Amino acid sequence: MSAPLLEVDRLRVEFETRRGPLVALDDVSFVIAPGEVVGIVGESGAGKSLTGAAIIGLLESPARISGGRIIFDGQRIDDLDPEAMRRVRGRRIGAIFQDPLTSLNPLYTIGDQLVETIRTHLDLSAPQARARAIDLLGEVGLAGAHRRIDQYPHQFSGGMRQRVVIALALCAGPALIIADEPTTALDVSIQAQVIALLKSLCRAHGTAVMLVTHDMGVIAECADRVAVMYAGRIVEIGPVNRVIHHPQHPYTRGLMCSIPAIGQGHSRLAQIDGSMPRLEAIPAGCPFHPRCDKVIERCRTERPGLVDTGTTHAACWLHVEGVNE
């Protein structure tokens, strides 16, 4: 097995407040191998996007990394100064965000923005950078790239703008892309096109992807492995087929049961009672225990770590206690 491209080791992120720090990410650990697609899923507020922002150095005050390490391609990057991190971000790590309108400057043509990014990270002349930009736009499926390169973001549809953002993320040939909800703002048919495009491009370029989403269908289509997050912690991680078809944590099972199956008639959808706890009210022990229908006494007082369940790794005392689920 090759060395991991990205290693997140016991990452902890806090928000400083007048009443003291609030822990938003706690002991988050995972690795991504070169060329691998790892999905990060969970409800809103689970910490998915915050994990991506911490990796690429885009945490905004009052958030800060207060513990752990982030190692990329053998180099620790969580303690780099802003200028050194800027050289890594864009050149070695690309980013795709959920709303392409916030990623593109409306005052500049897409060609200007692509050329600027290319020349920032690669030693190319302006004509060479423009030629590369046209090639990238063609590669992401933008028809008439040589003509549309001089148009502005408002002249493109949402799906086309997201293709431009993918081209921006790929323009310096990064080894890793952090894709944060890349299809949320798009309709279903365009979502499928963008996901297929991202998947094929990353396979062609050998680029690894950390795919942040709440959509298990997107994960099933794209990912090699998946990590399920809850209240700032990873509660289950493993190969995507095993997590989807044989979930070992009650929260993961709840997520999967809430997805209706085609051809099965149900009068009501299954649901997980309750809601994600606020940062200032995360309970002791397993943070999911107030919502869990399999809770045992140990869940209320002790926090479980990830254990090997035979199919995945899950943070659940039921597997340690040998409780028959």
Image (spheres, rainbow, N blue to C red):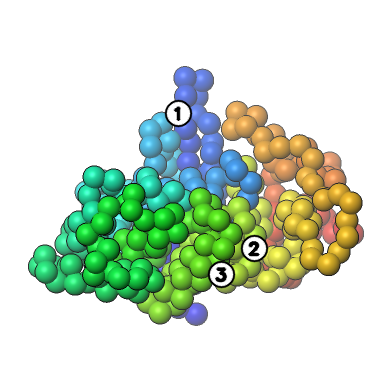
**Residue 10 location, x and y as percent?**
51, 51
Q: Mark 3 falls on what kind of element?
A: helix
Report the amino acid beneath label 1.
Answer: Glu
- What count of labels does the image hold? 3
Q: Check the image and report above or below for 55 versus 166.
A: above
Q: Badge 2: few (under 14), some or many (20 or more) residues near its Cα, within 10 Å?
A: few
- Of residues 134 and 208, the one nearer the viewer is 134
Residue at 45% from the left image edge and 28% from the top image edge: 16
Quarter of the C terminus within the rendering: bottom right
Residue at 77% from the left image edge and 53% from the top image edge: 258
Residue 120, numbered label: none
Q: CA distance from mark 2 to mark 3?
A: 9 Å
Q: Are marks 2 and 3 in contact (CB under 8 Å)?
A: no
Residue identifier under label 3: 222
Q: Badge 3: few (under 14), some or many (20 or more) residues near its Cα, within 10 Å?
A: many
Q: Mark 1 falls on what kind of element?
A: loop
**Residue 281 location, x and y as percent?**
65, 29
Residue 16, numbered label: 1
Quarter residue 131 falls in: bottom left
